[in-house]
Amino acid sequence: MLAVKASLLRLHKFGHWTRTPKDTFFPRPRILAINPGSTSTKISVYEGDLESFTKELQHGADELAPYEARPITEQAGFRKQAVLAALAEHDLTLADLDAVAGRGGLVRPIPHGTYAVNERMLADLRAAVGGEHASNLGALIADEIRRGTDLPAYIVDPVVVDEVWEKAKITGFKAVRRLVISHALNQIATAQRFAQEHETFYERINVIVCHMGGGITVGAHRRGRYLDVNNGLNGEGPFSPQRSGTVPTGQLIDLCFSGKHTKAELKLLNKGRGGLIDLLGTADLREVEQRVADGDEWATLVFDAMAYQIAKHIAMLLPAFQDEPVDGILLTGGMARSDGLVAAIRSYVPEHCGRVAVYPGENEMAALVQGALRVLNGKEEARTYAPEAAS
C-alpha cells in the first residue's frame, strides 16, 4: 500500500515516472556495493533491497607495502581482484550483476544524488582534488569492475555533498569560509527512510539528522535540500569519541603559539585523538557508560556534556527552516545504539524541535544500494558529474 501511495504522490507532484526496461512491479536487480577503508574493502550484494551477503576483505601489510607513500588510488587494481574473488566464493560473476555502487570519495562539491561514474570523476579522484582518502577508491574500483561490460557504475552522496546556503558559510574571518564535509550518505539515507516510513518523499519533509559515530554531524534537511551541516571532519560541532569539535578560538590561538604542541599534534587533537580520547582516554562509548555506571564523576560529566552539545547543535539548526515546522529529529550512527545517550539527548531537546526518532548504525551499504536502486527502478535519473569548480 505504501508503494502505491508513494507512486501516486510522485506522479502527482513530479509528473511522469519513466521506467527502465528492467523495472517491473517487483524489481529485484542485483547490486554490488563497495566501501573501501584504509586497510579493508567492505562489499555487499543485494537483490533489490534484500541483502544477500556482506563481507569485509582485509588487506594485509604485505599487500599494502608496495603502495606505501603512493597515491591510494593506485590500489584500485589489486582491490578489484579481491572483490572478484569474493564474488566467485559466492558463485557470482559480473554477468549476475545489474549495477555496481561505490562509496563516493573526495570529489569536488556537488549536490546530493546518485552519480554515474565518468572520466571527469575518475580524473578528479586520481588527482586527489579534495585530498587523499580511502573512499576515493570507491568509484575507481567500481569502474575497474565494470570495464568491458554494460554494467552501470555509480557513486551515491559523497562526503562533499554541498547544498549549504551561502549565508551559512560566512565567518567573521574574511579569509576563512566554512567548508562542507559530512556524513552525507547516511544523513540523506536516514532522512529518505523517515520519509518512506511516513508515506511521503524527501522533497516534502523537514528533518534534522544527527549522525553520531567517530565524528558527529548535525544536518538540516529542508524539503529535499541538505541546507546546513557542521564540518564534523575538521573541528566543528559537538565533540565526539575521536574529534575535538568546536573550541574557543582565542584559547586555541594561544595554544597554537604556546610551544607545547607541534602542528601535527594539534591536528591530531582536532581529529583522531581529541574528544573522548583526550578527555577520558578511550573512544569506546560502552566503556564510558560503564564508568558512569560505576560512579565515575568525571566520566559522568563528560558523557552529559557530549549529550548537551549534541542537543545544542540540533537546536541551533532551527533557523534553517524559517518558521516551518520540523517533522523529526533523527538520531543515527553507531552511538545511536546507546539507550543512555539517546535518553540524555532527548532530555535536552525541546518538544517544539520535533519528535525524536532513532535509526542506529551507519547503514552505508544499504544506502549505496538504495541510491542505485532508485535509478534502476526509474524513480530518479542518474546525475552527471560536471562540477562548476572545474569548468
Image (cartoon, rainbow, N blue to C red):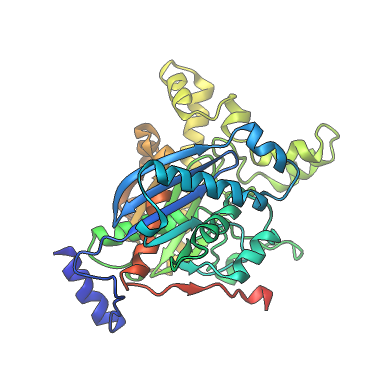
**Percent position of residue 65, x then y:** 70, 36
The quadrant of the image that shows the C terminus is: bottom right
Q: Residue furthest top?
A: 294
| Residue 373 in sight in this render | yes
Residue at 37%, 36% in the rendered image: 337
Find residue 374 and report its image quarter: bottom left
- Please, is residue 21 above or below residue 184 in the view? below
Q: Residue furthest bottom?
A: 15
The quadrant of the image that shows the N terminus is: bottom left
Q: Residue furthest left?
A: 1
Nearest the viewer among 73 and 93 is 93
- Please, is residue 293 above or below residue 121 in the view? above
Position of residue 34 in the picture relative to residue 39 (left or right): left
Residue at 41%, 57% in the rendered image: 94
Find residue 271 and report its image quarter: top right
**Percent position of residue 221, x then y:** 42, 63
**Percent position of residue 12, x then y:** 24, 81
| Residue 202 in sight in this render | no
- Please, is residue 82 above or below residue 339 in the view? below
Residue at 38%, 59% in the rendered image: 95
